[in-house]
Every structure is written in structure tokens, then in C-alpha cells.
Amino acid sequence: MGTKLTLRMDEKLIKNAKKAASSRNVSLSRMVSDYFKSLSTQQKKEMTESPVLSEIAGILPSKADNKKLLKGYKKHIEDKYL
């Protein structure tokens, strides 16, 4: 059994949350618990990548693109100087 948690929220928000839980056939406690679990999972995924890696992801070419880039650069140099 879990530990009790008290949350203070606007009454309208609580009513809407209870309706949402009811429409999903789960308790509000279960819905909140599942949400917190999803936050933990997301945080673990985010921690596996450094902020710098996340920032530059997709900028660097893959190894398969190296030949294509080299060929394009070679053509650029030939066009420029020949």
C-alpha cells in the first residue's frame, strides 16, 4: 500500500480530474501516480544525454554522408579555383 499524499488544488480542477479518471476507469490516485511515474521515466531518458549532445543532435553528419560531403566539397573547390 502506498503513502497518503495531500494536494491542494482549485475545486474545478479537482472535479475535472475526477471526471477524467472516471472516464478512464481508474482512480484519481492511480492517474496521478501514473503521471509521476512517467515523469521519472522521462527524466531518466533525458539524463542519458548531455545537454550539449541534445543541442547538437542532428547537426553532425552520419558516416554514410562523409563520402557525399567530400564529393560536394571537392566539386565546390574545383568550381571555385578551376
Image: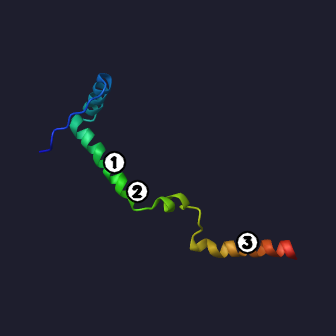
Q: Which residue is pictured at 76% across the width and 76% down the height?
A: 74
Q: Is residue 64 visible?
A: yes
Q: Is residue 72 left or right of residue 20?
A: right
Q: Is residue 75 left or right of residue 34?
A: right
Percent x, y of residue 17: 29, 30
Quadrant of the rendered image containing residue 9:
top left
In the picture of the structure, the residue carrying the numbered disc 2 is 46
Residue 39: which disc?
A: 1
Name the spot of residue 22 as percent of width and height, x first. Answer: 25, 31
In space, the residues marked 3 and 2 are separated at their CA atoms by 35 Å
Of all residues shown, which one is farthest toward the top? 12
What whole-number distance in Å separates the C-alpha atoms at marks 1 and 2?
A: 10 Å
Secondary structure, mark 1, is helix
Q: Tell me the kind of residue under disc 1.
A: Leu
**Marks 3 and 1 close (CB-CB < 8 Å):** no
Indicate the quadrant containing the C terminus: top left, top right, bottom left or bottom right: bottom right
Residue at screen point 73% across, 71% down? 72
Kindly identify the residue that appears in the image at 80 percent across and 74 percent down: 77
Q: Name the residue beneath numbered marker 3.
A: 72
- Residue 66 left/right relative to 82: left
> Closer to us: mark 3 or mark 1?
1
